[in-house]
């Protein structure tokens, strides 16, 4: 059994956290490929080292003296090194870093040092081999991640190595310059490594015991999800329920490797398994509920719309020409609505209205703003009877008016639209009927 394990910034923010990480790794002999983030926050209003590095680099670009900023970052690492009792001195690394900052080595180079240095510390503490991600994670000349060449190279490099630490978040371009993924990108590195070594599982260690069935800011203590499929995850993530970087799914998904989200502070919890497919029945009828506010509905009415061939195409063409992406298109006999993101639509609304008049000559166009969309997601809903009934009666009991209903053909989700003001109450009502009262 082989596992690739990635630890997030909060799992590596202090020596205490690093000790927990090392214990987790030592407790399971199969945890052989380790990907660390940079030190994250130690307490709620603390700064992440990655942010300090960006700020430091920007200050250097403004021509400011960065001595103090570098010293503050070094102090973060020295605190960890001291707490672990390691015989390690990063002074030369910091001197080089400061020099390269002054020589404009790039913002990506600057940010990458967070993971790089943390990787050196963790490798030393674990007595694992350190491999600089710049040697094994490749980007092409356009700065796009080169997945296949990276996979071949990594596979060869790691073939005969047993226990390694590869820092997350960055790699190198063909000219050797450092390039990072977008923020949170250590998740992607972990997934790339898991794919290359054909790991049995990719463990992603963070500070929550897995993905939750609902947003903890809205529902008190929502239950964690035991198992979720990639497709369900995508539906929930699209509605804002994220536990990891979205691009981290692809490398492992193509190899059929499951992801296990785990909590460094509660290693006894099983966390959430993210899998391609499973015959394990979900605990509840729905796997999770998530939603987003800030949508607007463009409602178009025209008599005899139903007999006008090409009406929908002409409407959507106007939306396309205005560079807007649409979410849903509920329709009636003589009505056609398009749901769009309010922020994207606001600046273009008059141009869209004029375009629609020219394209389809409607009887009326009316806009309804401040809508929220809620997705009820679950593989268990397929073929289950009464889901919609329970959903609608729960919302009726909570006195919530449903503005829109859409069920995907996969029966994996039901999307409803409600007023922004009803959003939280709707989520709570759905949680109560499908998860809480179902325990
Ligand atoms: N340290 C980087 C960030 O803060 C990458 C990561 O943690 O995944 O975004």
Image (cartoon, helix red, strand yellow):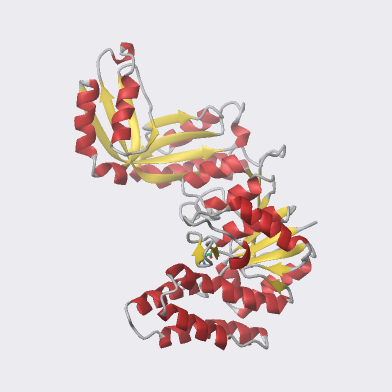
Horizontal side of residue 189 vs 256, given as left or right: left
Q: Quadrant of the C terminus?
A: top right
Quarter holding residue 234: top right
Q: Position of residue 46 (x, y in %)?
A: 46, 75
Query: Which residue ends up furthest to the front in the rendered image?
Result: 175
Quarter holding residue 329: top left
Horizontal side of residue 385 vs 375, given as left or right: right
Horizontal side of residue 312 vs 38, given as left or right: left
| Residue in the foreground of this view, choosing between 397 and 302 | 302
The residue positioned 45% from the left and 75% from the top of the image is: 53
The residue positioned 30% from the left and 13% from the top of the image is: 308
The residue positioned 52% from the left and 32% from the top of the image is: 390
The residue positioned 78% from the left and 66% from the top of the image is: 162
Q: Position of residue 163 (x, y in %)?
A: 75, 68
Asked if residue 335 can be seen in this view, the reply is yes
388 up-or-down from 265: above or below:
above
379 up-or-down from 268: above or below:
above
| Residue in the foreground of this view, choosing between 420 and 243 | 243
């Amino acid at each position: 059994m082989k596992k690739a394990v990635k630890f997030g910034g909060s799992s590596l923010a202090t020596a205490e956290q690093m000790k927990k990480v090392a214990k987790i790794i030592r407790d399971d002999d199969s945890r052989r490929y380790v990907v660390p983030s940079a030190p994250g926050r130690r307490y709620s209003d603390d700064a992440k080292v990655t942010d300090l590095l960006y700020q430091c680099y920007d200050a250097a670009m403004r021509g400011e003296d960065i001595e103090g900023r570098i010293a503050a970052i070094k102090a973060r690492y020295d605190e960890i090194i001291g707490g672990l009792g390691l015989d390690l001195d990063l002074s030369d690394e910091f001197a080089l870093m400061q020099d390269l900052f002054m020589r404009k080595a790039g913002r990506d180079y600057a940010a990458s040092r967070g993971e790089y240095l943390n990787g050196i510390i963790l490798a030393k503490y674990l007595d694992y081999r350190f491999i600089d991600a710049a040697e094994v994670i490749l980007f092409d000349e356009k700065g796009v991640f080169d997945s296949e060449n990276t996979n071949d190279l990594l596979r060869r490099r790691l073939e005969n190595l047993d226990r390694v630490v590869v820092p997350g978040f960055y790699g190198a371009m063909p000219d050797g310059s450092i390039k990072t993924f977008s923020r949170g990108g250590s998740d992607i590195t972990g997934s790339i490594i898991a794919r290359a070594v054909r790991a049995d599982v990719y463990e992603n260690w963070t500070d929550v015991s897995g993905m939750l069935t609902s947003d903890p800011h809205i529902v008190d203590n929502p239950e964690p999800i035991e198992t979720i499929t990639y497709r369900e995850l995508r539906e929930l993530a699209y509605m804002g329920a994220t536990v990891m970087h979205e691009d981290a799914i692809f490398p492992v998904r193509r190899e059929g490797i499951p992801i296990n989200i785990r909590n460094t502070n509660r290693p006894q919890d099983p966390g959430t398994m993210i899998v391609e497919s499973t015959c394990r029945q979900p605990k509840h009828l729905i796997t999770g509920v998530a939603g987003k506010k800030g949508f607007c509905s463009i409602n178009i009415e025209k008599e005899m719309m139903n007999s006008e061939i090409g009406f929908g195409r002409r409407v959507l063409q106007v939306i396309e020409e205005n560079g807007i992406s649409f979410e849903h298109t509920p329709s009636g006999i003589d009505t056609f609505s398009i749901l769009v993101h309010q922020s994207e639509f606001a600046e273009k609304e008059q141009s869209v209205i004029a375009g629609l008049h020219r394209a389809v000559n409607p009887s009326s166009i009316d806009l309804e703003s401040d809508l929220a969309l809620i997705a009820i997601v679950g593989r268990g809903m397929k073929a289950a009877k009464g889901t919609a009934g329970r959903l609608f009666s729960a919302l009726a009991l909570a006195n919530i008016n449903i503005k829109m209903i859409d069920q995907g053909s996969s029966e994996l989700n039901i999307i409803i639209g409600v007023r922004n003001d009803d959003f939280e109450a709707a989520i709570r009502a759905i949680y109560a009927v499908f998860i809480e009262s179902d325990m």
